[in-house]
Image (cartoon, rainbow, N blue to C red):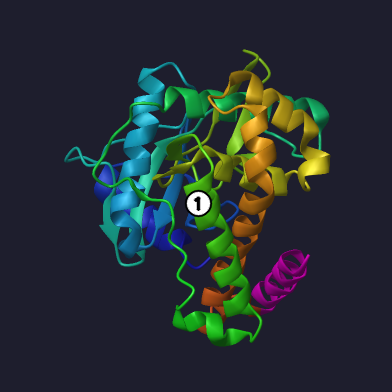
Amino acid sequence: MAFVDPVGAAIRRVWHINPDSVEPLSHGLQTTAWLVTAGSERFVAKLARADDRAQFQAGLAAAEHLRARGVDVGIPLRTADGALCADTDDGVLALLHAVPGRPLDGADHLDQQWWGDHLGRVHRMGDGFTHPGVTPWHWLRPDADHLDVEPWLRPAVAEAVAAMTKLCVTDRLTFGVLHGDPMPRAFVMNIETGRTGLLEWGAAASGPLAYDVAAAALYAGGVPAAGDLLEAYTATAPVTREELDAALPVMLRFRWAVKADWHARAVDTGGAAEGCHLEGLRRAQEALAG
């Protein structure tokens, strides 16, 4: 709740909108979000770290690119001076048009089909998008200081990075613009129209599309539980099932390393809910050990 009042003040100052309510939404690995209501309009406010500004802007531009190609995705409401986002004391803030619908349930078989279908369509329609803020996807550094919070962490992250690097060198992977954190609640189903939408694209990176699929599969409970998601994805995506079968084991390991790095960074800086991050490290350790 610490950011709610500053977010409302920034929206009034930068977008000249007076919110009726600003309600916290779930955190992602890279951004924090709030649901903003102003009269009959609904928006999603997204806050990223100041250091991630270029990548964050690229993600907002990617959303505009996808909307222009017919994909239902939350696009940014430009600021009063025409910018994609605004600098605040707490980071970089964007205000997105809310996409109507209910969030998808990653454990529901039908929702998994909608989820996989839309993620595949997003990947296909993202082809050709360019932006100076689209950075290479590999951001993990096995030599980072915060990996000292646990003795097992640095070797596990280094091993996952080495395996991923080898995969990208030896296999022919399909590259494109990554969402980075395609959790089921980032996708919605509009019951009235029967259309699936993506709430937001808060950041953008260039990398193997199989990484996004691995992240989604983990949210679904792992590959065995994500059968409907994977089947629907390969029916619409530019990635074949054969490529996924070859890449997913390594990408899943790398995704766990990304999660471990995120939790370790929070613990190292004394972030809020440290107990939650320590539990996250325990789960990552078990997964990486397996």
User: Does the image show residue 76?
Assistant: no
Q: Estimate the x, y position of residue 92 in percent, counting from the top left.
A: 33, 56
Picture coordinates of residue 68 (x, y %)?
Answer: 35, 19
Left or right of 250 in this view: 55: left
**Front-lying residue, 181 or 87:** 181
The location of residue 221, given as percent across then percent down, is 78, 48
Please give the name of the residue rendered at 64% of the width and 61% of the height, measured from the top-left corner: 256
How many numbered dots are placed on residues in this image?
1
Q: Residue at x 50, y 81 (%)?
A: 146
The residue singled out by tag 1 in the image is 33
Which residue lies at the image location 44% right of the left edge and 47% below the top edge?
Answer: 45
For the C terminus, the quadrant is bottom right
Nearest the viewer among 117 and 160 is 160
Q: Is residue 278 above or below residue 185?
A: below
Report if residue 276 lies within the magenta region. Answer: yes
In the rendering, at what x and y percent does residue 74 appear? 45, 32
Does the magenta stretch mainly form a helix, a strand or a loop?
helix
Residue in the picture at 47% in, 49% down: 169
Q: Which residues are magenta?
A: 275-290
Q: Residue furthest top?
A: 193
Image-based side of 214 in relation to 200, left or right = right
Nearest the viewer among 134 and 274 is 134
Residue type, numbered disc 1: Ala
